Image: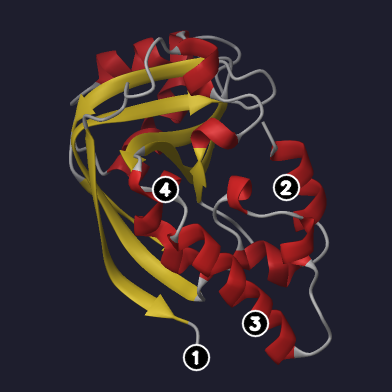
Amino acid sequence: MRDTTFEELADTSIRTQRLICFEDYYDESDLQEDDEDDEFAAGLAAVNERVYNDPRCSRPLVFVCNTQLEVEVFPRGGETYDRAIEGIKNVLQIRALRHDDALRKLLDCSNGGHLRIFFMSKPSVFMPLSRGMKSADITFSGKVQVGVTGYTNGTGGVIQLPITFTLPLTFDDSRPIRVETLIKHNYTESACMSWSWCKSTQFELSNIVYNN
């Protein structure tokens, strides 16, 4: 696990943090931002070339999409759950009373945290994130793995919902898409018996916008 190292390096600048998608593919020598833009760009190009040639780019990994919705579960039940379910359904674009029972079970299994979507992808699909992508839409479908998890100890609750919804992603000073299994306390290693547990989640990127 290299998450601690990555966080230390990412703190060096907001700009550097925007350019990084895969913690495991970068080391300190790659992340030294130079005063000269062309030298920094050359360093980034070298990193990208190494990533594209890395055989790990052809192997699907577990990714997580953070919806940025923070979910409170205490005190249990009642109005707390009602507010949480309303917020979750708004993000997931679920209408009427569909899936309310499943969402209550999700909250019962969680100690609170962020609403996250778990899926599998080849890392190469998200390489444009390190090449100046400004924004994009991501559509999830199939049997979507939806979780309310925290990363202090990797625990939380996850359920599978047969839904389709689209989220707007912006890549400014945040990283809404991460390699879940490279986070120090991740849900996959803490709670799952298989590295392919979330392959039922389908996704598609669209409306990609790059920085000028």
For the residue marked with disc 1, what is the amino acid? Asn
Q: Residues within 10 Å of mark 3 (few under 14, many from 20)?
A: few
Q: Residues within 10 Å of mark 1 (few under 14, many from 20)?
A: few
* Left or right position of 11 against 165: right
Q: Nearer the viewer, mark 3 or mark 4?
A: 4
Residue 93, quarter of the rendered image: top left
What residue is shown at x 37% (from left), y 67% (from top)? 136
For the residue marked with disc 2, what is the amino acid? Phe
Q: Residues within 10 Å of mark 4 (few under 14, many from 20)?
A: few
Q: How many marks?
A: 4
Chain-order first, disc 4 or disc 1: 4
Q: Nearer the viewer, mark 3 or mark 1?
A: 3
Q: Give the spatial CA distance, label 4 vs label 2.
A: 21 Å
Judging by the rendered image, the residue that carries numbered circle 1 is 212
What residue is shown at x 34% (from left), y 57% (from top)? 125
Q: Give the spatial CA distance, label 3 vs label 1.
A: 18 Å
Chain-order first, disc 2 or disc 3: 2
Whole-percent x, y for residue 147 in the image: 42, 26
* Left or right position of 194 against 12: left
Whole-percent x, y for residue 113 in the image: 58, 28
Judging by the rendered image, the residue that carries numbered circle 3 is 42
Q: Tag on residue 55?
A: 4
Q: How is the image coloured?
A: secondary structure
Can residue 88 be seen here? yes
Judging by the rendered image, the residue that carries numbered circle 2 is 6
Chain-order first, disc 1 or disc 2: 2
Chain-order first, disc 3 or disc 4: 3
